[in-house]
Amino acid sequence: MSYPFPILLTDTTRWPGSARFAVALANAGCTVFGVCPTHHPLLKVRALRQAFAYSALRPLESLTAAMNSVRPVMVIPCDDRAVHHLHELHARACRQGPSGRHVADVIENSLGPPESYPIVSGRYELLQAASEEGVRVAATNRIRTVDDLARWQEGKTDSCVLKADGTGGGYGIRIAHSPAEARTRFQELTRLLRTLRVFKRLIVNRDPFWLRPWWSRARQSMVVQAYIQGRPANCAVVCHEGRVLAGIAVEVMCASGPTEPASIVRVVDHPEMMSAAERIARRLHLSGFFGLDFIIETETGAAYLIEMNPRITPQCHLRLGKCRDMVGALMAQLSEKPVLETPPVTRSDMIAYFPQAWSARNELFESSFHDFPDDEPDLARELEKPWLDQTLLARLFNYLYGDPEQSSQCIFTEPVAPTAKARSCSSL
């Protein structure tokens, strides 16, 4: 059966982003399919045409079966592991010759050329490429051993940030405020694939996708990054063959921790962030969705790029008017028609993400637009359930075995005045 604009979403986590994005795609006229684990919020979306099981031990076979069944015009990863699986699948499809050409073509049309895959998957490689394009980046170095870390810290007394590749949602990030603490945090990150932690993720978090890298004895690549005093910010864009079609930039106003995802954001005009996205998309000839994370330095207001998310991010489903409607821009690209201007879902520049912001309601929350899925009651009920990392069992394990505690306390950041005049939307 032929469907209008079939799009396949892939997600190994149980984050709400893919479900919210699926609703927006369906409302724009796409036919939405999904590859996801059981008990996933995506399964509660009424417009989801069909869901396919995402095997933790045989993920490439799951993706291949779904793509051969759906024949999508585009496959959109919704988390970092799903991105890595698509990169793996592309390499395998190319080795298969003509029989794998369809799968390889869809992945390239969805993400960009295979030459870009190692770059977008590696924090160090991405920042190197961005720096060569004139993007302001935080000083970063690859580390493999404690000795590498010690060499980085020679003559430095400032704080630093340690990050493990292949992780998302803040799970593989640690902030250290002294050399001794940095060594401790380094050891924590090297133990992410230890047996006890992997089985904790399996049993407590119901996340079996750590089993495959654990079984294959994968080694976590790691970087150390200069700590920049400032406030977090980010932008998300949709692009096609290196050209940015639309995007949204935000400053983080509230989050549950210094390395945790945002819960309340402020939409801003920020030419420096959007220019960075345009340069990276053009350099790597990217297609699809990606997000960039920044720190806006307190003293100067300069935006330092700290990492890339080569997937959808929380604001991608928001339709905020001309040049800020990523779903509308994608639909125009797929249909080869002009972008249909739709009224923005809100005129407020303050957005409270559901369900993240609902756990710590405050004055800022009350004055924000509540990004609540009113037209999807089953999805809303599913997302209102406690996140698995917040359960009593998860907190007990974190206390006993040293996983970073998840805090429900909202951390506020002070707004920074814009330092540059916003560019016209026509530059996108």
Image (cartoon, grey):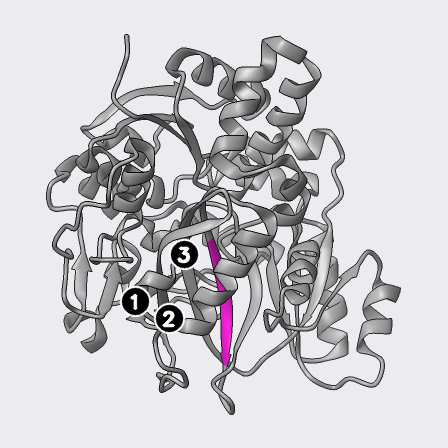
Residue at the image position 70 percent from the left and 43 percent from the top: 194
Q: Nearer the viewer, residue 310 or 151?
A: 310
SS class, disc 3: strand
Given residues 134 and 154, the one toward you in this image is 134
What residue is pinned by disc 3? 236
Q: Is residue 269 visible?
A: yes
Whether residue 133 appears in magenta in the rendering, the answer is: no
Q: Residues within 10 Å of mark 2 (few under 14, many from 20)?
A: many
Estimate the x, y position of residue 29 in percent, counting from the top left.
20, 31
Horizontal side of residue 175 vs 325, given as left or right: right
Amino acid type, label 2: Val
For the record, the magenta segment spans 291-296
Residue 66: which quarter of the image?
A: top left
* Residue 302 against residue 299 in the figure, above or below: above
* Cβ atoms under marks 2 and 1 closer than 8 Å: yes
Q: What's the residue at 48%, 66% (across, down)?
A: 275
Instruction: Name the mark nearer the viewer: 3 or 1.
Output: 3
What whole-number distance in Å separates the C-alpha atoms at marks 2 and 1?
6 Å
Structural distance between the alpha carbons of marks 3 and 2: 13 Å
- The residue carrying mark 1 is 264
Camera-side mark, 3 or 2: 3
Q: Position of residue 27 (x, y in %)?
A: 17, 36
Q: Which of the pair 238/404 is nearer the observer?
A: 238
The quadrant of the picture occupied by the N terminus is top left
Q: Which residue is denoted by mark 2 in the rendering?
A: 252
**Residue, far bottom:** 299
Task: Report the amino acid beneath label 1.
Answer: Ile
For the point 51% across and 92% down, which residue is it? 299
| x and y, in percent, of residue 392 in the image | 40, 51
Please identify the quarter of the rendering in which residue 240 is found.
top left
